[in-house]
Amino acid sequence: MATRLVLPARPRRRRSLRIVVLTTALAVPLTLFTAGSGSAAPTLTVAQAQAQLAALQARADAAVEAFNAGRIATDEAARKSAVAQSRVDAEQKKLQAAQAKAARFAAAAYTMGGADSLTGLLAGQSPASVLDRAANLNQVARSRQRDMLALAAQRTALAGLQKTAADRAADAADQQKRLAQAKESVQALVTAQQKVLSRLQADQRKALEAQQAAQQASALRASRSGTRVAPLAAAGPAPAASGVAGAVLAAAYAQRGKPYVYGGAGPNAFDCSGLVMWAFARAGISLPHSAAAQYGYGRHVSRSELQPGDIVFYNEGGVIGHDGIYVGGGMMIDANHTGGWVDVRPLYSGFAGGTRL
């Protein structure tokens, strides 16, 4: 069974905020597993393990959201590449049609012959016949000239489209590499967390696992009963909301107790931006699956201006690395971290801003 820890509030970070979009992959669970017992590293106290995991978790949040942003960038690059290639295909068909038309004109000119007017008169043809034939030859020549000019322009256009298509394909490949790198970053942080867990005594892991399992079960019961009071609510029950905010919160509350999964966007598991995207979709509002991208939507509000239904964002190591939905009373509902689940929790330090849609 996966080992889960209740992490303390993340420490405040005073670095300047910047939004990073890195470079779709399948959703991969990021549940922490205990490492083997043969580790030579000294054992840790629960408090020490929690402190180390909290620091690693902040970095993991940012890495997961970078992966989510990378999926968006990769999908967009692939779409642009496909569009560029379709334009190349269409232009190639036009060029082939123009070449076939030019060939037909050349054959017609050959059939009509190239004799000039004097040769025709000497051959005993009537002046009218010679003039008609000359006019037809001139018309063919003008048409052929236009066709050759059009062919040259089409070849130039095709070359430009082929260059664009090649650039788009290269960008798509580059974005795919960046996405793979983002995934590797997350997996490296998982390994680091596994090493921390391996330094706990078996009885400590068992006790923490039991504690977290009980808390998750409580969240599931609250979801099924429609309870909206946070289990840790020091500020009391969250105020009621209506309209879009009410629909968003109702959708989010119904997910309480469901597990955090890397790349998850419902209905059975979520990561932080996946939960926000899911809840707002239930209210008819479409958002991307990326906390950094979601930060660009709606109207920004300060912490003192927050209202139920607003999205709250957190600075994780200098980037937008986590978000949730404000429920009022200093509380939010979010999919909090690897090994965690959707639940109502207090706002914590590192608040980067709020957004109202």
Image (cartoon, rainbow, N blue to C red):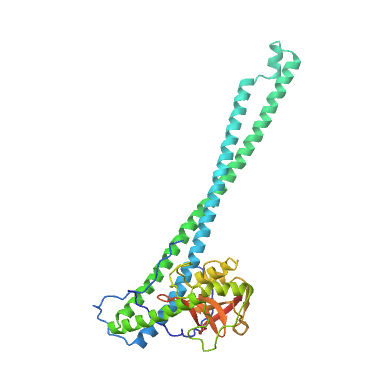
Residue 54 screen position, x and y as percent: 41, 82
**Residue at x 67%, y 27% (from the top left corner):** 140
Q: In the depicted view, which residue is nearer to us: 63 or 259?
A: 259
| Horizontal and vertical percent position of residue 190 | 37, 73
Q: Most extreme residue toward the right, as rendered?
A: 128
Q: Nearer the viewer, residue 266 or 242?
A: 242
Q: Is residue 57 left or right of residue 320?
A: left
- The answer to whether residue 357 is seen in the rendering is no
**Residue at image coords 60%, 70%:** 297
* Residue found at the far top of this picture: 124
Estimate the x, y position of residue 288 in percent, counting from the top left: 54, 66
Picture quadrant of residue 124 = top right
Residue at the (50%, 56%) spot, across then down? 78
User: How many marks are shown on the rendered structure?
Assistant: 0
Residue at the far front in the pictured view: 225
In the rendered image, the vertical position of residue 136 relative to residue 350, given as above or below: above
Q: What x and y, as percent, mark residue 202?
A: 28, 82
Residue at 59% in and 25% down: 107
**Residue 76 falls left or right of residue 214:** right
Quadrant position of the C terminus in the picture:
bottom right
Res 101 visible? yes
Quadrant of the image for the N terminus? bottom left
With respect to residue 109, does 151 lie above or below?
A: below
- Which of the pair 166/346 is nearer the observer? 346
